[in-house]
Image: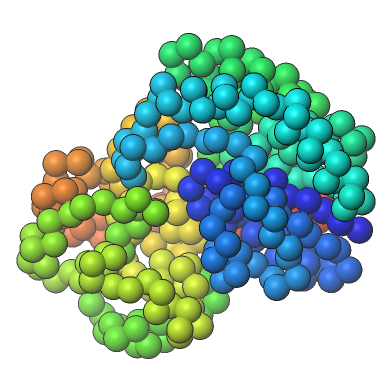
Amino acid sequence: MLIVFYISGHGFGHASRSIEVINALVDRRPDVEVVARTQVAPWLFERTARPEVRLEPLACDTGVVQIDSLHLDAPQTLQRARAFMQDFPARVATESARLRDLSASLVVSDIPALGIAAATAVGIPAVAFGNFTWDWIYAGYETGEDLAATLGEIYRHTTRALRLPMWGGFSTMTDVRDLPFVARRSTIDRDRVRRTLGFTATEHIALVSFGGYGVHLDQAALSAVDGWRILSPETFDESSLCDHGFRYEDLVGAVDVVVTKPGYGIVSECLANRTALLYTSRGKFAEYDVLVSAMPRFLRCAFIGHDDLFAGRWQQHLDAILDQPAPPDRPATNGADVAASALLEMV
C-alpha cells in the first residue's frame, strides 16, 4: 500500500504538519509506503520525517509570493498562480502517470489542487488536508475571483477533506471532517533542553521565528531588554539543536515567548508546548485574521507593531505577555493520530 502526499512549498507549516501525519501513519502501519512530492527543503524531511519516507522534488503549487517575511506581493502571487494553471493539464498528465507508476492507493494534498486533480484522473481517493484552501486565499485578492473559481472546481472532486482548526475555505468540498490540532509537541524535559543549550532554568527567553526570510532587527536594542535573553539567528545557531538531538519544537517548548508572524505551524506549536506568542502583522493574507481571532482562546498572545518590532522596543510587550492568565481553552493536539486513522480507513 502506497500513499502519496502533495505538500505546498509555501513556508514550513504545511510540511511540518504533514510530516506529523506521515510519521503517525508509518508508526502505526510500517507496511505503508509514503512518497512526498513537494519543493520543501529536503533538510526538513531529513531531520523530522521517518527514514522510510521517500521525497520527490516537485513544485506542486505557487503559494504566495513573499517580498520578505512580513510583506507579500499580491499581483505577482496571482500572476504566478495563473501561469502555473496555464500548464495545468500537462502537469496533471505527468502526475497521473507518476501515480500509476507508483501504484498509489491514496493521495493526500496539503493543499495543492494538483494532487486532487491527479488522483481524480487516476481514479483513486483524493484527500484534502489543511486549515485553508487556496481558492479562499486567492479570492481575497483583487481580480483573483476567476483563479479562485477554477481551483474551487478542482477541489470539488475531493473525496474527503480533513480540516484543521482555525480554518478558512473548503466551500466546494462535500465531505469535510474536522480534526483536532496537528502540532509538533516536545517530548523532552524543558529544563534539560535549557541546561544542554546553556540557558538557566529561571531566565526569561524569547525566540525570534520568522522563517527562511528572517527579519532585520536592532540587535543592540534587543540586548538591552532587561531580564530577557533574545534568541535570534544573530545570537543563536539553530543548527546546534540537531547536534544535541533536539528538534525545533523542543526549543519552542523551552522558551517563554515566541516572537513571530502568525501561521498555523508556529501557532499550533506554541499551543501544544504552552508557550506564549508575540505576533506582528504579515500583509494581506486571509489566514491572518482567522488565526488572530482564534489564538486568544488557546494561548497567551499579544500584538507588536512593526515600528516597535524592528526598533527592538520589546520590553513592555514581553513583560506584559507573561502576566496574562492562562487561556480559557486547552484543545486536543492529537490530530496527527486522528488523521492517520482516517486515512487508513480509506485504503
Q: Which residue corresponds to the image point at 31% horizontal and 53% vertical from the top-left?
A: 214
Q: Nearer the viewer, residue 140 or 294?
A: 140
Residue at x 76%, y 57% (from the top left corner):
35
Residue 271 is situated, as x and y percent measured from the top left of the image, at 47, 57
Q: Which residue is painted at 61% across and 43% down in the image?
A: 59
* For residue 62, above or below residue 25: above
Figure label count: 0
- Left or right: residue 206 compared with residue 285: left
Apparent side of residue 79 relative to residue 306 in the rendered image (left or right): right
Work out which quarter of the rendered image holds the N terminus and state it.
bottom right
Where is residue 346 shown, x and y percent of the image?
89, 47
Colour scheme in the image? rainbow
Q: Residue at x 64, y 24 (%)?
A: 85
| Quarter of the figure with residue 182 | bottom right
Which is more toward the observer, 92 or 193?
A: 92
Does residue 107 appear anywhere in the picture?
A: yes
> In the rendered image, which quarter is residue 172 located in?
top right
| Horizontal and vertical percent position of residue 5 | 73, 50
* Residue 324 drawn above or below residue 64: below
Pinpoint residue 134: horizontal percent, then vertical percent.
58, 30
Is residue 324 in view from this perspective?
Answer: no
Q: Is residue 106 above or below residue 161?
A: below
Drawn side of residue 105 relative to residue 297, left or right? right
